[in-house]
Image: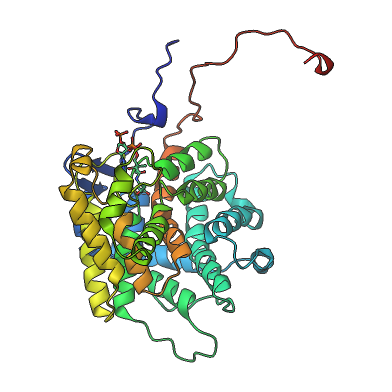
Amino acid sequence: KGVITLDSGFKNTGSCESAITFLDGEKGILRYRGYSIEELAEKADFLEVAYLLIFGELPTIEQLEKFHSDIKKHSFVDDDVKKILDAFPKAAHPMGVLASLTSALTAFNPSCVNVDSVEDMYNAIVRILGKFPILVAWTMRKKNGLPLYYGDDSLGYVENILKMMFKQPNQDKYVQNPILVNALDKLLILHADHEQNCSTSTVRIVGSSHAGLFASLSAGISALWGPLHGGANQAVLEMLEAIKADGGDTAKYMEKAKDKNDPFRLMGFGHRVYKNFDPRAKIIKKAADEVLSDLGIEDPILDIAKGLEKQALEDSYFVDRKLYPNVDFYSGIIYRGMGIPTDMFTVMFALGRLPGWIAQWREMRMRKEPIGRPRQLYIGETERKFVTIEKR
Ligand code: CMC
């Protein structure tokens, strides 16, 4: 008590106790509620994983059906939200649009603002799980100049998301592509939680003031947007494109990344916690190969990415600092193969992270955690006398 320890970036500060996600950065292990990420990505679907993260156990068939049916009851947004969406310029960054619309939902769902009981929380949770994919899909449809579409209740959660994103006007029969469904399911599962990262910590700290769930999520989306966090997936693809346009000279970019006078960093490399392979990156790299080959796409960007990875893993700068590819290094290549625009990549990350943010917010409220309020070490002026403006 009374002694304030400085820990910039909270590198060694635990902000909470949590039973949701286990991460061993030295060994490259990631588990949700005790289940390995490898097994979940292979055997579970996204909605099951969402249930697992939020409520702590894998659902039975009945529990999952009820959860999905409760979500479907809220798979609409108020018509006035369309007007807000309409007011954004077409070129607006989708993450800004998504954060704003998520916050705006608070105004249309007042029952989700002051939530205290487990029932109130459940009500807010199923609402946002129903409405958020619509905001995501509409953000992309607006960008692509497509009319808004509400989705198809008869479909699975992820199938419906894809249809909401891609259904063309005048398309009588939308045919699901199982390759895209599986790829998106896997990507969303891999992004679903990652303990106390920047956006999750934001959700927990905003929520700790008892601001509503949607407001806390909106803050999390804004935190995720930055290129050092979720925005890295967009930055990776832009970097790979720039390397390709520059003749594909990966060695030149490796040198830039190592040059301390150059602000350039190898995007999609390095992690605060993983000092070994990011287990998500391993799965995504394999999936990128499979999805592109299943879709019959040959993307030269994938070769550039693999070339960069190979060089980095053999380079003492990266080896000494234990910098490995992270989750964002290969994910954009899959999203691109699926036909998702580059500036929508971080929105897709937000869609995947939604259950994790919700689970962490719920845990924080259930455990009645106190308001988050870090201290500081003051390094400013000591007491000074006020000088009137004429005398300065
Ligand atoms: N390229 C070149 N050098 C790097 C990189 C990189 N991508 N990442 C870290 N370094 C160097 C850094 O310059 C520092 O070197 P030195 O010790 O000589 O000063 C050393 O490695 C340690 O880096 P740091 O910045 O102190 O580490 P951090 O834990 O504060 O930052 C990071 C972690 C992820 C922000 C950082 O590695 C980075 O900027 N990576 C690129 C952006 C990125 O891919 N972000 C996605 C992260 S994973 C998904 C997510 O969070 O959403």
Which residue is more in the foreground, 26 or 263?
263
Can residue 57 be seen by looking at this rendering? no
- Quadrant of the image containing the C terminus: top right
Which residue is more in the foreground, 256 or 343?
256
Q: Residue at the spot x=50%, y=61% of the render? A: 132
Can residue 321 be seen by looking at this rendering? yes
Q: Quadrant of residue 295?
A: bottom left
User: Is 311 rendered above or below residue 337?
Assistant: above
- Pinpoint residue 226: horizontal percent, then vertical percent: 47, 48
User: Is 307 rendered above or below residue 340?
Assistant: above
Q: Residue at the spot x=51%, y=55% of the render? A: 123
Which residue is more in the foreground, 137 or 110?
137
- Pinpoint residue 249: horizontal percent, then vertical percent: 28, 60
Q: Is residue 175 left or right of residue 210?
A: left
Q: Residue furthest right?
A: 390
User: Is 322 rendered above or below residue 237?
Assistant: above
| Model colouring | rainbow
- Quadrant of the image containing the N terminus: top left
Q: Residue at the spot x=65%, y=65% of the render? A: 89
Q: Is residue 170 left or right of residue 360?
A: right
- Pinpoint residue 30: horizontal percent, then vertical percent: 23, 47
- Quadrant of ligand 1 in image: top left
- Pinpoint residue 31: horizontal percent, then vertical percent: 24, 48
What count of labels does the image hold? 0
Q: Quadrant of residue 185?
A: bottom left
